[in-house]
Structure formats: structure tokens, C-alpha cells
Amino acid sequence: MKNTIQFQKMKQENEKITMLTAYDYPSAKMAEDSKIDMILVGDSLGMVVLGYNSTIEVTVNDMIHHGKAVTRGAPNTFTVVDMPFMSYHLSLEKAMESAQKMMQQTNAQALKVEGASKETLRLVERLTEAGVPIVGHLGLTPQSVHVLGGYRIQGKDKKTAEKLISDAKSLEESGAFSVVLECVPDLLAAHISKKLSIPTIGIGAGKSCDGQVLVFHDILQYGVEFKPSFVKVYHELDNDIKKAVEQYHNEVKSKTFPDSSHTFAMDKQLAKELKL
Ligand code: KIV
Ligand code: NA
């Protein structure tokens, strides 16, 4: 399993870090088998696998339930779990309790928090001190979608660009070992990546980030309705799955499944004895 020191070294040596989300045992297993450097149990699971409208409905227990499945599927891959909506905003003590519960019950190696408010920076410091490596998350922070006014690119004007740069620096100073930059113009992400000594992981943030993260179901076009422009689809699983499921349905209807090769034949002697 890679660790925070190695991720730092990968940045220094200009080796890109691969991160992919996983939400359950099979996706985690496939990520590990594919040698993905770091797994994110993203709260995007609310939308991707639970059918919620946003990440706002996701709870600590949702994250624990899925986090556990992921660490069972990828026991040898560094796994980060998202702290969900408002699980770290009520008070520092409550945030620490959520974090403790998530770390102890999921068996993950790190947690991720969105934003860089004074309180969140203090939390990053406290958690790091307590032995919990923290990934920051700046730019488009989906837990704040209603404040941001939608899922849109961030840091497009001088004020917000400068704030992004200083927030990233603050996260590093508070002890975060990495920062996700989501939906940020390429040159801004490049500048932040150069300014920080910790690795940046980009999503819709260009190629200069120290690593990239994408959503498992997005790169496989697996049950997702909307494809953001920054997502590259590597395989259109939906088509394959639909074809297979339809074929199964049709073969049962047409009585071509099951055939003899998918059937347990009865012992002839016994069948005779029982008069079958
Ligand atoms: O929840 C998630 O999947 C994320 C990534 C997109 C960074 O936070
Ligand atoms: Na997330």
C-alpha cells in the first residue's frame, strides 16, 4: 500500500497520482487490481449508487457502510473517505467524533473535507495531530452547491482565483497531505500545484495537477445520466449491460434459457424409481 510519504515523493518525482472513486466491494477490487494509487470513497456515492439528488443527503452512516465494503475489496490500497455534509460543521468536538467513528469503522487510511473555512482548517490541524491524514477539496465543492448556485467552474475571476490560491496554501499549512481541485481553470490549478509542496489531485482541473481523480461510474458510463465535459469515458458499460439483461429477459420468455448446460439433470435410476 502506498502512503502519504510516497504520494509526496511522487509529486517531487513528477510521477502522476491516480485516484478513482469506489463505493463497494467489486469496484474497490477492480481499482486495486488495476493498480490505482489511491481510492476515494466519495460522497458522490449519494448520487451515483443511492440515487439521491445531491451529496447533501449523504450521512456518516452511509459513508461508513460503503467505506467498509471498499476497504474489504481493496485492503492494499490507500483509501480516503469523504466526510459528508455538515458532519464537520456543528462543532469541532462533533466533527472529531464523526471522524473517529469513520476512521475506526471503515478501516480507511484518510478522510477528505471540503472548503477551507477557519473552522475547517482548525479541524484539519486537529485531525492530522490525532493521526488522521486529511485531503482537502477546493474549487467546486458539491456540498455547497446551493451556495455556489449550481455545479459550475470556480476561480474564474480575480477575487475567487486569489482565494483559491490562499485556501490551498492554508490547507497545506494546516497539515493536509493533499488537495483535490475540482472544476478549476487549468492555469490556476497549475499555479496552485506549483506553489504547494503537497500533491494536488485534479478533476476538471487540467493536466498540470499532480494527480487525477474521476468517478468510477463516470469512466465506465455505468448508470449515470449526466456526463460532465471533463469526464473521459473509457468504456460504455451501460450498452453492454442493457444488451445482456435484455437478452436474458428474452431468452426466458422464448424458453431458450435455461438449456441443458445450465440445468442439474436428475439421476436416471432415481428418476425411474420415483416415477418422474
Ligand atoms: O465525491 C466525490 O466523488 C469527490 C470527487 C469527485 C473528488 O469528491
Ligand atoms: Na465528494
Image: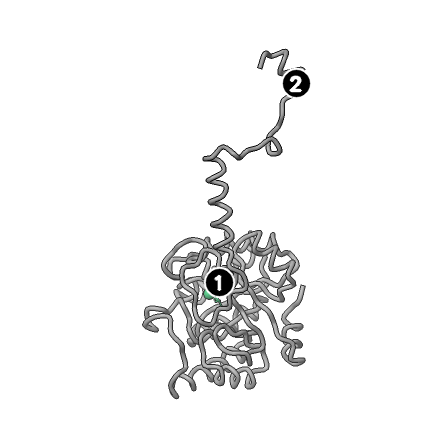
Rendered image quadrant of residue 275 = top right
Rendered image quadrant of residue 74 = bottom right
The location of residue 139, given as percent across then percent down, is 43, 76
Answer few, some or many: residues within 10 Å of disc 2's Cα (few below 14, many 20 plus, some between 14 and 19). few
Answer few, some or many: residues within 10 Å of disc 1's Cα (few below 14, many 20 plus, some between 14 and 19). many
Badge 1 marks a residue whose secondary structure is helix
Residue placed most toward the observer, 215 or 85: 215
Tell me which amino acid carries mark 1. Answer: Asp
Tell me which amino acid carries mark 2. Answer: Lys
Locate residue 36 relative to residue 155 in the image: left or right: right
Residue placed most toward the observer, 113 or 21: 21
Can residue 81 be seen here? The reply is: no
* Residue drawn at (63%, 11%) of the image: 273
Tell me which numbered mark, 2 or 1, is placed earlier along the sequence: 1
Mark 1 highlights which residue?
218
* Residue drawn at (52%, 63%) of the image: 219
Query: How many marks are shown on the rendered structure?
Result: 2
Q: Nearer the viewer, mark 2 or mark 1?
A: 2
Q: Give me the C-alpha separation between circle 2 and circle 1.
A: 51 Å
The circle on residue 115 is none
Mark 2 highlights which residue?
268
The location of residue 13, given as percent across then percent down, is 67, 80
Whether ligand 1 has any atom under 8 Å from the Cβ at mark 1 is answered as: no
Badge 2 marks a residue whose secondary structure is helix
* Residue drawn at (62%, 25%) of the image: 265
